[in-house]
Image (spheres, coloured by chain):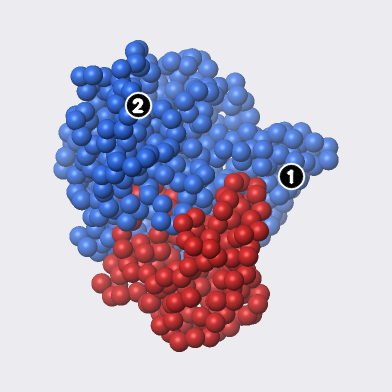
Amino acid sequence: MTAPVLVFGWGNASRGDDALGPLFIERLRSALGSSADVEYLDDYQLQVEHALDLAGRERVLFVDASLDCHAPFEVMPLRAARDGSFTSHAMSPQAVMQVFRDLHDGADPPPCALLAIRGERFELGQPPSPGAMAGLAAALQWAERWLAGPVNATRA
Amino acid sequence: MPPTLETATRPQGLRRVAIDPVSRVEGHGKVTILLDAANHVQQVRLHIVEFRGFEKFIEGRPYWEVPVMVQRLCGICPVSHHLAASKALDHVVGALPVTPSADKIRRLMHYGQVMQSHALHFFHLASPDLLFGFDSEVNRRNIVGVAKAHPETAKKGVLLRKFGQEVIRVTAGKRVHGTGSVPGGVNKHVSAEDCAMLKRDVAQMVAWAQDAVAMAKQLHAQNPALYDGFGSLRSNMLSLVRADGALDLYDGVIRARDAAGKMLFDGASDQGYLDLIEEEVKPWSYMKFPFLRSLGREHGWYRVGPLARVQNCDFMPTPLAESQRREFLDWGKGEPIHATLAYHWARMVELLHCVEVIEELLADPDILSGELMTDGARRRSGVGVIEAPRGTLIHHYEVGDDDLVTMCNLVVSTTHNNQAMNEAVRSVAREYLDGHELTEGLLNHIEVAIRAYDPCLSCATHALGQMPLDVALLGPDGGLIDRVVRSRLGGFTHDLGSHGGLGA
């Protein structure tokens, strides 16, 4: 049985604030425990097969570190869109949604939102910055409310 | 093969074009093109920044942590690093050889990894270019466009990759941060349930891989002048092969051929890679330039990856792929194939081979039972060489009596291909840059050439909102003449604001 809600964080745990996505998943899972209603997934980065993870959901929350969002975090609804890239080493959540659409004969993916947590440093071997950890804590509080809220809630 | 366009004879008075996929720390590439007053290409350099500092990150850690930690090098091919580190550290713990079960489970993991990476590259990154042509609007040059024009193709690509990920999961323990391979062997068998699950789908995967080879072959046949000529360059080629000359992606001896296909050396032990290869540092690039010592800096650079592997080996040890390999070789009419775009065709032949190997291994009872670990006389150092999706990958470690790593040296496939990628971009710039305007068409062509190699970049590059492509045209005095920016979602705009990035 597919859980109706998916929370998906990504990033590299060894690169400073890039760890925010996986840390978010780890801490939210720990705080709320396992549930039939919510599935938590994390990965290094988004890839095409993650479009398959969107199937059967009522709503999806993508979580990533960001350099250009306002601190401590921002939440925004997402629309399927296409990436322009010269490498297989990066993919946006919008592009994952677009892959879903094209794998399902144009059907819309479930409502998706992006939770972008402000990051400051991304050097190899660095721990997450104090500012990012504060943003993480605030984002987790917001996420608990989001998970308890209505299906269409995407605003901070 | 002198790098004629790498350094201009008279850099003064030249105009510079900079193509800069912006990122925050690493993982960005940049192309700089210097023009003379007559708008002729005088100098072209490709800058790739990848694993800066990772070797120091590993030094000082206990050796048994290393196969897990090195997976953080790359989110696309973590298994290759996981296994190359394990192979190197097998020498340290004296596990020579590992048990048959460990060898076969690792192989299964590795071929699953190469399969899923090849599927991602071809269906997601390359096939939009190949199916729609390089001048198509950027928004169509992605899997979305593929899906619209070839819906079943896109679905096959995603599901092939998903299958490869499942192979990794059942052998490495997890899809991400796998722990299955350890110095001396592996820590779990494949379960009977997982094996049965994969067996149910593998025949379908073989069929789809055959379709992928057919598509790549058909594309070459439709426009042979383009596919043979685009970004073409002659080079030496290097790869592992099995002792009997068969293609082997997991283990073997090192073989190199020259541009005419003549054997330069064969049967070389991977433990002696430093006797074969030297890495040159150039002041304008963070990435080193390896070359074959026997040929020297100027003539010793080489290519690795699918194009090298399928031509370096004597045969592929699976029937369907070997048949396709022979058809691929026939395309060269007796001469080695050097076309940059032939990488895609060779990659799909390897995809088919990988699925055939996976099918064989799933039928082998050794993956379900048998000894998993072994050890022997302790050593202070070890080298692990593996054929990763993009080419030869070398891990080299020295370990102290306290079990801590004292030295780490990594030579990744993108580094091996550094000079070749530079040459490919130069070839494209010479042909398609008119010197008057930065056009989206030019950028498309340069991207197509880079994409054929799919350079492995650091994965800390998903800074939301950042622009992946930034192109600046500078005059002889360093003043900005033109600048174009491509957004992550494909937009292309002229922007005469300040520009950043590496210096040329």
- Judging by the rendered image, the residue that carries numbered circle 2 is B478
Q: Is residue B353 above or below residue B202?
A: above
Task: Kindly give the residue lying farthest to the top in the view shown.
Answer: B9
Report crowding for label 2: few under 14, some 14 to 19, many 20 or more residues within 10 A (C-alpha): few
Q: Is residue B99 above or below residue A92?
A: above
B354 relative position to B19: left or right: right
Q: How many marks?
A: 2
Residue B152 image point, x, y percent: 26, 64
At label 1, the amino acid type is Arg
Residue A48 image point, x, y percent: 39, 61
Residue A110 in view: yes
Instruction: Tell me which residue sits at (68%, 57%) in the image.
Output: B187
- Judging by the rendered image, the residue that carries numbered circle 1 is B61
Quadrant (top left, top right, bottom left, bottom right) of the C terminus of chain B: top left
Q: Which chain is red?
A: A
Instruction: Tell me which residue sits at (31%, 22%) in the image.
Output: B476
Q: How far separated are the C-alphas under marks 1 and 2?
A: 45 Å
Q: Is residue B128 above or below residue B384?
A: below
Q: Which mark is residue B211?
A: none
Residue B88 image point, x, y percent: 66, 39
